[in-house]
């Protein structure tokens, strides 16, 4: 059953765009084989990761995620990536709109980081092992009781200096619209005293037309989505890194979530009202009668 911790999206098969260029069956097979090869290399690298240090792990992860994108013929266009690549000991909550399983590959191809992911991903063949080894924090969205401990773990990770990638919509959308950002995860940024770094993601074709084909929505399986992406020709994933939002910019987690949502919508040429910070009420002590 859907609840605020596990929202549902109205997107489904009717959202997919039509008449898009595709590649040959031979190219589809080659892409899928290449992706499997990349995942196998990643799985074999898991035992080595603790031995090569943080810089080595980040370089290896970046190359793996870039190889995933290349294997599917995805061209990554990055704007403002220098701000994300810049090394810093300070943590940040990295928040994006959520469209596809390609989202996390794109973000990590620019700057490898920890992520907050659904707990069932841990059980995926090969990929689950790789994701867990990357330091992923897992969340059980079906359980509201898990929310406080998840926020506490996320806050501790941010406070220790980690960048953590989250999808505050709580589910995927087709890309033509965006869900409301749920405020719970933003409490972790406030508790950890770290900024929020919004990132806007958009998919389009080589001719500039936006496409919803890469979306992973509705009741389809991950295999269905992977095959559809493998058939697409000229896919471009546009990633725009936006200005940080300091925790002090908002009075509470709800306003911080709304600011991040508005920043991403603005970058995607959508208009949403930007919340104004409400003044905090001061307590007034009345004199005794």
Image (tube, rainbow, N blue to C red):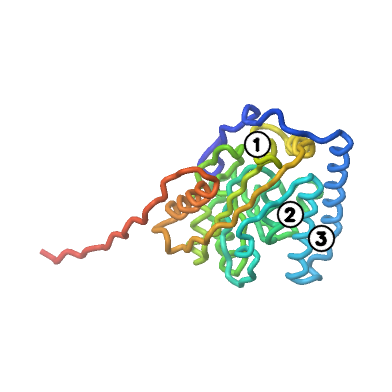
**In this orientation, which residue lies closer to the viewer: 43 or 247?**
247
State if disc 2 and disc 1 touch (CB < 8 Å). no
Quarter of the figure with residue 150? bottom right
Which residue is rendered at x = 56% and y = 32% of the image?
A: 10
Which residue is rendered at x = 62% and y = 63% of the image?
A: 84
Horizontal relation, residue 184 to residue 31: left or right: left
Which residue is rendered at x = 60% and y = 69% of the image?
A: 161
Within-10-Å neighbours for mark 3: few <14, some 14–19, many 20+: some
Within-10-Å neighbours for mark 1: few <14, some 14–19, many 20+: many
| Helix, strand or loop status at disc 2 | helix
Say which mark, if any, is on residue 237. Answer: none
State if disc 3 and disc 1 touch (CB < 8 Å). no
State if disc 2 and disc 3 touch (CB < 8 Å). no
Q: Which residue is mark 2?
A: 131
Tell me which label, 1 or 3, sits earlier in the chain: 3
State the separation of the CA atoms marked 1 and 2: 25 Å
**In this orientation, which residue lies closer to the viewer: 211 or 56?**
211
Give how far across and how far down residue 174 sits, in percent: 61, 37
Q: Which residue is mark 3?
A: 46
Horizontal relation, residue 134 to residue 95: left or right: right
Q: Which residue is mark 1?
A: 212
Identify the residue at the far front of this view. Answer: 207
Give how far across and how far down residue 79 sits, in percent: 62, 56
């Amino acid at each position: 059953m859907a609840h605020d911790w596990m929202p549902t999206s109205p997107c489904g098969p009717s959202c997919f765009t039509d008449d898009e260029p595709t590649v040959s069956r031979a190219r589809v097979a080659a892409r899928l084989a290449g992706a499997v090869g990349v995942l196998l290399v990643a799985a074999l690298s898991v035992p080595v990761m603790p031995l090569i240090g943080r810089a080595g792990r980040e370089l290896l992860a970046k190359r793996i995620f870039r190889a995933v994108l290349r294997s599917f013929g995805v061209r990554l266009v990055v704007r403002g990536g220098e701000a994300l690549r810049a090394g810093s000991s300070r943590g940040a909550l990295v928040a994006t709109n959520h469209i596809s399983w390609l989202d996390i590959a794109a973000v990590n191809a620019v700057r490898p980081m920890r992520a907050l992911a659904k707990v069932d991903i841990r059980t995926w063949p090969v990929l689950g092992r790789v994701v867990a080894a990357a330091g992923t924090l897992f969340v059980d969205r079906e359980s509201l009781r898990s929310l406080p401990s998840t926020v506490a773990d996320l806050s501790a990770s941010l406070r220790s200096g980690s960048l953590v990638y989250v999808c505050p919509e709580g589910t995927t959308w087709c890309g033509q619209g965006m869900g409301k950002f749920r405020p719970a995860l933003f409490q972790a940024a406030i508790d950890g005293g770290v900024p929020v770094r919004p990132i806007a993601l958009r998919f389009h074709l080589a001719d500039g037309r936006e496409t919803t084909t890469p979306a992973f929505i509705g009741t389809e399986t991950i295999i269905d989505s992977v095959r559809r992406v493998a058939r697409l020709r000229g896919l471009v994933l546009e990633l725009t890194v936006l200005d940080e939002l300091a925790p002090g910019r908002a009075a509470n987690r709800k306003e911080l979530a709304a600011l991040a949502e508005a920043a991403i919508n603005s970058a995607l040429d959508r208009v949403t009202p930007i919340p104004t910070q409400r003044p905090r009420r001061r307590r007034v002590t009345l004199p005794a009668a």
